[in-house]
Amino acid sequence: MAKVELDTAEGKVGDVDIEHVNGVGGHLLDDRFLVLLRNIFGSHIIQAFEDYLPVAMLDFMRNFELTKSNMAPEFSKKYVFCLHAALIKKYKFLVPSFRGKDAFSPNPRYGDKVTMTDHNLVADETIVWFFLKEAVEKVIEFLQSAFEKLQIDSNTAIIVTGGYSQYWKLRDVIRQKFSKRHVVYMDSPAETALIGALMVLKEIEAKKTFDSNLYTTEIIISQ
């Protein structure tokens, strides 16, 4: 988290204070999603996917990254995760009892709350949230701690960014926990690092920090 003070009169960035912690963010959400998958399919099945079908498994995780912003089951109370055809084929090879079935429950523990077809994994909201809530709760704990350490008062606008910020449940919990704060979400959170870098560049150019005789005008921004 970065606390940025802006000089509105001159349109410049003032003081910047940063609070950082490891183990909080989108990576933890991905880890919890893998725990969910291991509980549904079994650890040996997911390990087989990772060992023998790494590309298909990576594609599945990328799909989770892309679709988590749409994980808002207001109507059906179900989450739908697209499955790579290679994973379906491998699963039915490893578990012959499911061959020839259009839809089935991969784990009797969850019954019809978790079902699988030749294209999707469909899970009840309560099952998914049980596994993903830790990732959301850790973000809330970090925000509460950072607000205190950085002495951020209730009148300060909060800009939440990054791909994780698109997860609707995180937004929902933030809205509940920090209802008195003005929270802003970026339309394109992945572009925020670029926007920030351009703001810094503008500041540098305004102060004429770069000597044109020493530096080239080409600047590469890596994200």
Image (spheres, rainbow, N blue to C red):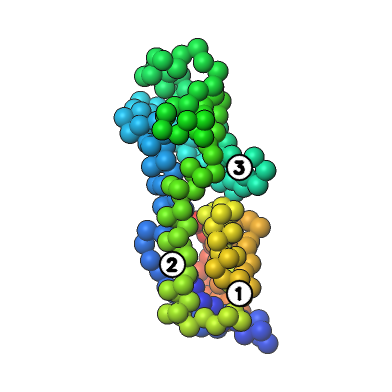
Q: Is any atom of residue 177 visible in this view? A: yes
Label ID, residue 29: none
Q: Position of residue 140 (x, y in %)?
A: 47, 65
Mark 2 residue element: helix
Q: Residue at x 35, y 28 (%)?
A: 45
Mark 1 residue element: loop
Answer left or right for 8 relative to 213: right
Cα–Cα span, label 2 and label 3: 27 Å
User: What residue did someone put label 2 on?
Assistant: 141
Quadrant of the rendered image containing residue 138:
bottom left
Q: Position of residue 48 (x, y in %)?
A: 34, 27
Q: Is any atom of residue 66 visible in this view? A: no
Mark 3 residue element: loop
Q: Are marks 3 and 1 in contact (CB under 8 Å)?
A: no
Q: Amino acid at mark 1?
A: Arg
Q: Position of residue 123 (x, y in %)?
A: 53, 37
- Compare marks 2 and 3 and give the one earlier in the sequence: 3
Answer left or right for 175 relative to 146: right
Question: Considering depth in this image, is 31 or 213 the residue closer to the camera?
Answer: 31
Cα–Cα span, label 1 and label 2: 16 Å
Quadrant of the rendered image containing residue 184:
bottom right
Q: Position of residue 160 (x, y in %)?
A: 57, 65
Comparing labels 2 and 3, the label whose residue is closer to the camera = 3
- Compare marks 1 and 2 and give the one earlier in the sequence: 2
Query: For the view shown, which residue lies furthest in the bottom direction?
Result: 9
Q: Amino acid at mark 2?
A: Glu
Quadrant of the rendered image containing residue 21:
bottom left
Comparing labels 3 and 1, the label whose residue is closer to the camera = 3
- Compare marks 3 and 1 and give the one earlier in the sequence: 3
User: What residue did someone put label 3 on?
Assistant: 77
User: What residue did someone put label 1 on?
Assistant: 181
Position of residue 181 relative to residue 133, above or below, is: below
